Amino acid sequence: MKREYPLEARFFRTETGNEPVREWLRSLSSEDKKAIGEDIKTVQYGWPIGMPLARKMCNGIWEVRTRLENKISRVLFTLSENQIILLHGFIKKTEKTPKDDLDLAVKRMRQLKKGVDI
């Protein structure tokens, strides 16, 4: 399949219409939102892209890695045709990505594959 660039960034939407990553981003400072948004945009225009900005986490899940002033954020995403679907965002507090965060992204990716509307 031929990809079109830039890839469209879409927020995962739950069955009830919530967009968890959008809601998480709204809770951050404007500086943090800007930095994360710039990194997502770089992935959109540069895909496939690797470290240090993006890294594959498991089958079908990648992370956008953003260094903020005093912390590190991660946005976990999957690809669907010419889109990156933003599944889960969090501030990283440990060296290794917490299993619960990765499991949540995998669960949301599976919901997408079952045909839940994004």
Image: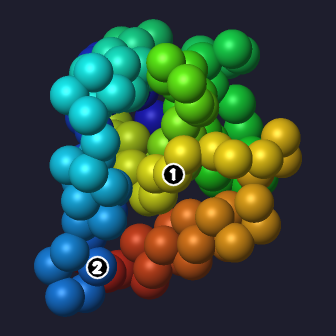
Pointer 1 local density, CA inside 10 Å: few below 14, some 14–19, many at least 20? some
Q: Earlier in the sequence, mark 1 or mark 2?
A: 2
Q: Is residue 26 above or below residue 100?
A: above
The disc at residue 90 is 1
Horizontal side, residue 8 vs residue 98: left or right: left
Q: Is residue 19 above or below residue 10?
A: below
Q: Amino acid at mark 1?
A: Phe
Residue 5 visible in the displayed image: yes
State the separation of the CA atoms marked 1 and 2.
17 Å
Q: Are marks 1 and 2 in contact (CB under 8 Å)?
A: no
Q: Which residue is mark 2?
A: 14
- Where residue 44 appears, as percent x and y from the top left, is 36, 23
Give the residue at x 64% y 53%.
60
Q: Quadrant of residue 35?
A: top left
Give the residue at x 69% y 47%.
93
Horizontal side, residue 19 vs residue 51: left or right: left
Give the residue at x 75% y 60%.
98
- Where residue 86 appears, as percent x and y from the top left, is 39, 50
